[in-house]
Amino acid sequence: MPKIKTYEEINQKLKQGKAVVLTAEEVAQMAQSASPAEIAEKVDVVTTATFGAMCSSGAIINFGHTSPPIRMEKIRLNGVPCYEGLAAVDSYIGATACDPENPAYGGAHVIQDLLEGKDVVLEAWGKGTDCYPRKHVRTRINIDSINEFTLFNPRNAYQNYNVAVNTTKKMIHTYMGTLLPNLRNATYSTSGELSPLLNDPDLRTIGLGTRIFLGGTQGFVVWNGTQFHTTRPKNEYGVPVTNAATIAVIGNLKEMSPEYLQAVYYEKYGVSMFIGIGIPIPILDEDMARRVSINNRQIETSVLDYGTVGMPKLEQVNYEQLQSGFIKVKGKKVRTAPVSSLAKARKIAGELKEWLEKGQFELSKPVQIFPQNTSLNSLKETEVEHD
């Protein structure tokens, strides 16, 4: 039986160029002929990745002080509203924020424009105070003129996600794309056996402080993501069969690449942002080797009817079926399409693998493991008396 490895031992092998690093797809292939014990003996790290729309994303920006100074109490970047309640010249721009008069351009586009080195119009207003007497400023900013430009995403990299279909007679527009009537298409959003949290479903190695690939540079997991739900039903392989755990992440946008952060507009729904995330999974023992060996046939997810109130579950399918181009729903053959990029996820997993093999990326042991047995509350509506 292979011995239990430590983070320190694996990092030392990485520095020496002696570590064996595989992508999640490569180790899934290896598992066709090798046991978990053999994989644990031979492999040190497995890289995982995803590249998809992650609405719960945004950026913290410090603009710097004007002369005379202003306390920014209303802020617009290219017309897109930013949150102003942080400090005088700090702001948070959410990826999905937009000007109602221009709904196809939003916070994600502002972030991408800045990342690409473009100028963005900043306009801000304040009431004027003794220490911040200025009441208005309109100017141009760019990635070099601002101080901090930090990507901070409260919910990314869903552990699994449902498949969306529409059984009604009317076309509907959703964050899963346009769903044609009468079950004429199905969309899905996870990279299957490459997906980070599916390769460590119990989150043994992913927690507070985990170093990750984020937007083309190194970032960190800083908390469990919002809507973190670990009590979802699982299949026989221990994989949740619908959306479950999530992560909150942070990184320096000034070091990121527009190749791995891209704004998107979904017709009649709104703006979102594609985020590239890669997470290295250390193969500490035989159990971790078994977990990362999972393949698309073994990863199942739920087919939900987005056209019906309550989104009832219609089927349960696996990612091999989804990636084949067709699934069966209620006895009908339905064409499938991803709303994330498997090709880009493969590129991220490969790039992270290269960083590790060259000793340019070090594994970090979580300083705190995420909570277990968590569930979600729905918003309860109660009558509120008017004054």
Image (cartoon, rainbow, N blue to C red):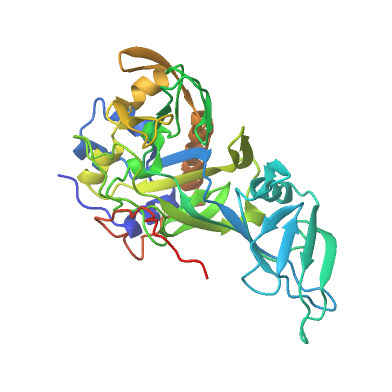
Where does residue 214 sit, x and y in percent of width and height? 53, 49
Task: List the single residue furthest toward the left.
Answer: 1
Q: Is residue 143 visible?
A: no
Whether residue 205 sits left or right of residue 265 in the image: it is: left
Give the image location of residue 12, x and y in percent: 38, 56
For the N terminus, the image quarter is top left
Residue 268 lies, with reference to residue 256, above or below; the image says above
State whether residue 348 is above or below residue 325: below
Count of marks, rendered view? 0
Q: x and y percent of residue 13 in the render?
A: 38, 51
**Image spot of residue 109 (x, y percent):** 68, 45
Give the camera-side residue of 33 and 340.
Answer: 340
Foreground pick, 376 / 238:
376
Q: Is residue 174 visible?
A: yes
From the viewer's side, name the closer residue of 386 and 256.
386
| Residue at x 44%, y 64% (from the top left corner) | 384
In the image shown, does 267 or 262 lie closer to the viewer? 267
Side of 65 where 360 appears, left or right: left
